[in-house]
Image (spheres, rainbow, N blue to C red):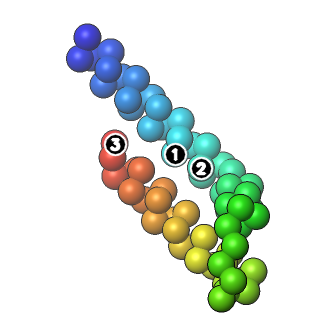
């Protein structure tokens, strides 16, 4: 059972990494649409979300 669990975990992480890598613009655009930080301009929000996205992707890759 452990082998199956490890396989499924690896598969899921690979899938998330591939999805995030292939769809960065879409993910960041949707996040920016949902998030409103009044003290930041839209371009500043995008830069912030790009940095959060890149960091999140690095962390997810490190899980594997």
Q: Residue lying farthest left?
A: 2
Q: Is residue 40 above or below residue 57?
A: below
Task: Please indicate whether residue 21 sits to the left or right of residue 61 in the image.
Answer: right
Position of residue 19 measured from the top left corner of the image (x, y, whole percent): 61, 43
Tell me the quadrant of the picture where the N terminus can be found: top left
Question: Which is more toward the observer, 62 or 43?
Answer: 43
What is the number of the mark on residue 44?
A: none
Tell me the quadrant of the picture where the C terminus can be found: top left
Task: Please indicate whether residue 29 sits to the left or right of residue 55 in the image.
Answer: right
The residue at the point 67 percent across, 67 percent down is: 35
Disc with the residue nearer the chain's start (3 vs 2): 2
Q: Is residue 26 above or below residue 46?
A: above
The answer for how far apart the CA atoms under marks 1 and 2 are is 5 Å
The residue at the point 69 percent across, 51 percent down is: 23
Disc with the residue nearer the chain's start (3 vs 1): 1
Q: Are marks 3 and 1 in contact (CB under 8 Å)?
A: yes
The answer for how far apart the CA atoms under marks 3 and 1 are is 10 Å
Residue that mark 1 sits on = 17
The residue at the point 73 percent across, 86 percent down is: 41
The answer for how far apart the CA atoms under marks 3 and 2 are is 15 Å
Looking at the image, can residue 18 be seen? yes
Q: What secondary structure is marked by label 3?
A: loop
Position of residue 40 measured from the top left corner of the image (x, y, whole percent): 67, 86
Residue that mark 3 sits on = 64
Residue that mark 2 sits on = 20
């Amino acid at each position: 059972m452990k082998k199956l669990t490890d396989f499924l975990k690896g598969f899921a992480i690979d899938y998330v990494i591939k999805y995030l890598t292939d769809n960065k613009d879409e993910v960041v655009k949707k996040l920016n649409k949902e998030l409103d930080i009044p003290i930041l301009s839209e371009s500043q929000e995008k830069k912030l979300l790009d940095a959060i996205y890149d960091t999140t992707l690095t962390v997810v890759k490190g899980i594997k």
